[in-house]
Structure formats: structure tokens, C-alpha cells
Image (cartoon, rainbow, N blue to C red):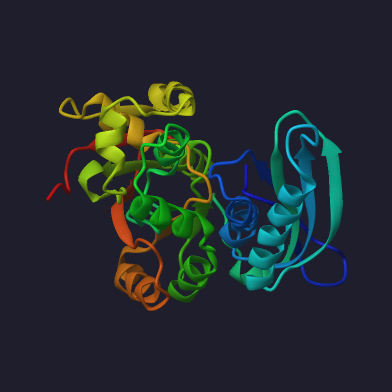
């Protein structure tokens, strides 16, 4: 299944459309709106498309929160969408005991430059463009155990658009792409490899991870979604014996507005890394490679550690 649907009219360019929404992962209303918008826009970027227009969707507990909070969430979302060149032209809000917000997004697509999940080939390099640890950070925020400096970095990273990663992928001729969100790195990698009919080998030490994530995960600040993600992929994944539960939890950490996972021909690896660096993505890490094997299967090795 692709990250977004593609509509191909008889006349005119293809359109990409998607919908996504999340519950709060940070306390500040404007930051929540911006992160939720970036998360929604990410599916369009993962397809190689350009966001054009969006509708906001929101569930709001009006008996628990003042309407000013709703205004600030919407403002954060509109500002982030505007940064992407995407107009929020309306939407719908319903009363809901649990706060949630996101966007329905339509984007334009050059069919000759589309990124899909089903085109990875053996020998391709796998590249990740944001570090892991957003789910762990959200748990720490809820328990007030994330320092101000780390909180600032996490908010900035989750709010960052994947536009630069998309542009770099297209410029370097990446074959396949997906964004890493709720299913964690392993879940999204499994789906991409399954769609492409290939397997993957990953080196844990090469995977970018926020500095705070491992000690917090080792201390038990692991979201419930991590266990569900591991249960989803464990039948398809072989872990090196030296990898502990913390390693596995981080690889399955559910991300919010995570980076793009790209499959690029080996001969284009250097160009992709240079393109990502030029665009200032949060990470540009070669985490493994595509191999021949049981479609969707993953080998996780301990290599790459410094």
C-alpha cells in the first residue's frame, strides 16, 4: 500500500491525496498544529509530489479546553502548510473527548518522477533522513523527563517538512520511498520491501537516533505502540543475538512526522547524500541495503556502531 492515493484523470496531471491526524505529542498548541500538519504533508512528499491544497480536520473537547487553544492549533497548522506552499481552504471540526488534529491534503504529481514503495532493487542503499526517537520523546514529555534543550530539538525536527528530502531523492534518482511514522522504522521498511518483492539488511549502529532516546528507552519510557510494532514485524525479522530489547524498541519506535526512508541505486548513493546535505535534512544516514530474499524480510545486524 502506498503512502497516498494517486488519481489519474483522463486529461491533466495526476493528483495525490491523503489524510492523517494525530493526538497531541507536545504541550504548546501552535507546535502541535505545526507537527500535525508536517506529519500529514509527509505522505505527499513520500510520493514525490507537491502539496497544493488541504482541509483541516479536528476533534475538540470544548468542555475541557478553551476555544483559544483551538485557534492556536489551527494557526500552527496553517503556518506550516503555508511554508509548504499549501493553502488550507477549510475543514471540519467535531466535538470529541480526545483532542486530535490533522489535514486532508491534495498534491500534484509529475508521473515521470513519482516515488513509490514497489521499485526497490537488490543492491540499493537504504537511507534515512530523520533520527528515530520521537515516540520515546513523547513518553518523556508526558512524564516531564525531557530536558528543555532536547525538547526544543524534538519539536524542531518533528515540525520540519520532508520537502528537502523529497527534492534530494528526486534529484538523485531514488527508486523507492516511504515516510517513517506510526509503524516505526521496521514496520515501514517491511512494507516497502514486501511491495518491492525484496528483502533488507540493516545495521543498527548506522541508524540515526536522538542521543536521549536510548537511555530513556532503557529506563522504560517506551510507548505502547513499540510492542505492537514489534509484534507486527517479528515474524519477518531476524535480529542479531547481540541486540537487546532497547535496540529492538528503538527500531520499532512509532514516529510522528518522521523522515523519509529512501532506496537508491548504489552508484547514486554519494549524490543522494550530497543532495541531502545541501538541503539540511536532519539525518542522511545509509542504514543498510536491499538484498534478494523472502519479500518483506529484514536482517538486523549490530554493524555500524562507532
Left or right, 290 with reference to 3: left
Most foreground residue, 305 or 287 = 305
Residue 81 position by quadrant: bottom right
Q: Residue at x 27, y 27 (%)?
A: 219
Measured as percent of width and height from the top left, residue 165 is found at 47, 66
Q: Residue furthest left?
A: 306
Most foreground residue, 101 or 64 = 64
- Residue 146 in sight in this render: yes
In the image, is residue 31 above or below residue 63?
Answer: below
Left or right, 52 with reference to 45: right
Measured as percent of width and height from the top left, residue 225 is found at 49, 27
Most foreground residue, 304 or 42 = 42
Residue 244 position by quadrant: top left
Q: Residue at x 21, y 37 (%)?
A: 301
- Residue 17 in sight in this render: no
Q: Residue at x 59, y 70 (%)?
A: 113
Left or right, 124 with reference to 300: right
Q: Residue at x 70, y 37 (%)?
A: 99
Q: Quadrant of the N terminus?
A: top right
Measured as percent of width and height from the top left, residue 65 is found at 73, 38
* Total numbered labels placed on residues in the image: 0
Measured as percent of width and height from the top left, residue 221 is found at 36, 29
Amino acid at each position: 500500500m502506498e503512502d497516498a492515493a494517486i488519481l489519474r484523470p483522463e486529461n491533466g496531471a495526476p493528483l495525490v491525496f491523503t489524510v492523517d491526524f494525530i493526538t497531541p505529542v507536545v504541550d504548546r498548541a501552535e507546535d502541535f498544529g505545526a507537527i500535525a500538519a508536517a506529519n500529514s504533508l509527509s505522505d505527499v512528499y513520500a510520493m514525490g509530489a507537491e502539496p497544493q491544497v488541504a482541509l483541516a480536520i479536528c476533534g475538540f473537547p470544548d468542555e475541557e479546553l478553551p476555544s483559544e487553544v483551538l485557534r492556536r492549533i489551527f494557526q500552527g497548522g496553517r503556518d506550516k502548510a503555508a511554508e509548504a506552499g499549501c493553502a488550507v481552504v477549510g475543514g471540519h471540526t467535531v466535538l470529541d473527548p480526545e483532542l486530535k488534529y490533522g489535514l486532508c491534503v491534495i498534491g500534484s504529481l509529475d508521473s515521470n518522477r513519482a516515488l513509490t514503495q514497489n521499485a526497490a532493487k537488490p543492491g540499493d542503499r537504504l537511507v534515512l533522513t530523520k533520527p528515530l526517537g520521537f515516540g520515546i520523546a513523547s513518553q518523556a514529555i508526558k512524564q516531564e523527563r525531557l530536558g528543555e534543550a532536547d525538547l526544543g530539538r524534538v519539536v524542531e525536527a518533528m515540525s520540519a517538512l520532508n520537502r528537502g528530502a523529497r527534492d534530494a531523492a528526486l534529484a538523485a534518482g531514488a527508486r523507492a520511498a516511504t515516510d517513517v511514522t506510526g509503524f516505526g522504522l521496521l514496520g515501514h521498511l517491511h512494507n516497502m520491501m514486501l511491495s518491492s518483492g525484496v528483502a533488507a539488511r540493516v545495521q543498527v549502529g548506522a541508524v540515526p537516533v536522538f542521543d536521549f532516546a536510548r537511555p530513556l528507552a532503557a529506563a522504560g519510557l517506551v510507548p505502547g505502540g513499540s510492542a505492537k510494532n514489534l509484534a507486527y514485524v517479528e515474524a519477518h525479522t531476524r535480529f542479531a543475538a547481540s541486540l537487546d530489547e532497547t535496540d529492538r524498541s528503538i527500531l520499532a519506535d512509532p514516529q510522528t512526522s518522521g523522515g523519509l526512508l529512501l532506496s537508491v541505486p548504489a552508484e547514486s548513493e554519494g549524490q543522494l547524500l550530497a543532495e541531502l546535505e545541501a538541503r539540511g535534512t536532519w539525518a542522511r544516514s545509509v542504514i543498510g541495503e536491499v538484498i534478494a530474499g523472502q519479500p518483506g524480510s529484514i536482517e538486523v545486524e549490530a554493524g555500524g556502531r562507532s
